[in-house]
Image (cartoon, rainbow, N blue to C red):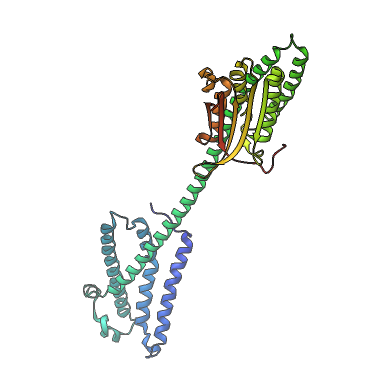
Amino acid sequence: MSPSPPWSRRTEVAVTTAFWVFLTGLLLVRGVLSPRGPVGLGPYAVARILSEYAAWVVLTPVVFALAQRFPLERGHAVRRLAGFVVFGLAVAAAIELARSALVQGLIDGGALPERLARRGRLRLTPLESVTRLQFVDEFVIYAGVLAAGFARGFAARAVERETESARLSAQAAQLEAERARLEGQLTDARLSALRMQLNPHFLFNALNAVSAYVERDPERAQTMLAQLGGLLRRVLDGDARPEVPLADELALLRDYLAIQQARFGDGLVVEEAVESGVLCALVPPLVLQPLAENAVEHGVSRLAGTPGRIAVAARRETGPGGDERLVLTVTDNGPGGAPPSPRDGGGVGLSNTRDRLATLHGHAATLTLADGPGGGAVATVTLPYRTLRAPSHA
C-alpha cells in the first residue's frame, strides 16, 4: 500500500474543493468581463461550467486515490499507464454525456430558452457529443488531475522515506551507542579479570623475595616489608583504572625495584632514562613491573659475582604512518639465553601484560623480548601515545 500524504484527508478535500470553486468563480468572472459583456455568460454557459467543475470536485479525490494505489512503479508503469488512459477516456466521456444530458433536460424542462437548442453543439444529442469527441477537453483536465495525483504520491513517499531514514538512522545510532557501551563493559570486565590474575602473582613473588631474609637478615626483611606495604597501597589504589599516567607507573616501579635492591644489596643497580614530556602519557597499570620482574628473575639473579644492572627507558617516537607512539624498554645485563617460556611470554606476568595491551589497543600495541646487543635481554613495549593534561607527579 502506498503511503498517505503528509497532510490530513480533510485538509486535502478542503484544498481540492477550494481549487475547483476558485476555478469556477474565475471562469464566471471571465464571462462577466468578456468583451461581449455579461450577455456572454448566459444560462447555458453557467450550467455548463457548474456541471463540469462540480463533477471534478467529486472525481478529484477518486483520481488521487487511484494514483496513490497504483503508482507508476518499474515493471508496472506501461500497463498501469494504459489503464489510466482508458479510465480517463471513460471518465471524460461520462462527464460530457452527463453534461449534454443535463443541458438537454434543462431545455426540455424550459429552464433554458428553446432558441439555445439551435446554437452550437446544443443541437447534438448526448451520444453525438461523445462520438464527436467533444470530451477531449475533459480528458485534458483528467490528465492534469492525474499528474497532480502522481506528484502527490511521490511527495508522500519521499516524506515517508525521509521519515523512515531518520528513524533508522536514530535506531542505528542507538544500537551503535549500545554496542560501544557493551564493548566498554566487556573491556572493563576483561581488564579487571586480568588485573585480578596479575595481583596475586605479583604479591606472591614479592612476598617470596621478602621471606628469604626473614631469618638471616630480619632488619632487611623489615625494610622490604615496609616497602612492600607502600607498593601494595599503590597497586590497590589504582586497581579500578584501565590506564594510569606513566609518572604513576614509574613511581610504582621504583618501589618494586627498591625491594629488589634491598634483596640484592650492592648487587643491583637501577638506571632510568625517561624523556621529558612523556610522564603524562597513559599506560596500563603494572605494565613495567612484569618486565622488571622478568629482568630480575631471569637476568640479574643468574649472574655470578657480577653486579646486576636494570635500565628503564621511555621515549616518544613517530611511527611509519605518522602516528605518535610511546616506547618503553627494560634492559638487563644478565647472561641471556633464559628459558623460553618466561622470555617468550609464557610466564603469567608477561602473557598477562600482552593480553591487557591487546585488550586496550589491539594490534596498535606490542610487547617484544629480544637479546641485548651486548648481552642480557631487552623487553620493549610500544603503544599509542596518549596523554593527560599534566602528570600527576614527577
Q: Which residue is drawn at 56% across and 32% down?
A: 381
Task: Quadrant for residue 361, please give it.
Answer: top right
Q: Which residue is drawn at 39% across and 59% down?
A: 154
| Tag count | 0
> In screen coordinates, is 34 left or right of 365?
left
Between 165 and 310, the residue placed more toward the observer is 310
Between 63 and 118, the residue placed more toward the observer is 63
Q: Give how far across and how far down residue 59 sits, in percent.
A: 36, 65
In this view, which residue lies farthest toward the top? 215
| Above or below for 56 versus 45 | above
Task: Residue 103: tell me if it is visible.
Answer: yes
Task: Quadrant for residue 142, please give it.
Answer: bottom left
| Above or below for 88 versus 380 | below
Between 164 and 122, the residue placed more toward the observer is 164
Between 315 and 267, the residue placed more toward the observer is 267
Q: Residue at x 41, y 76 (%)?
A: 24
> In screen coordinates, is 324 left or right of 4?
right
Q: Residue at x 31, y 77 (%)?
A: 103
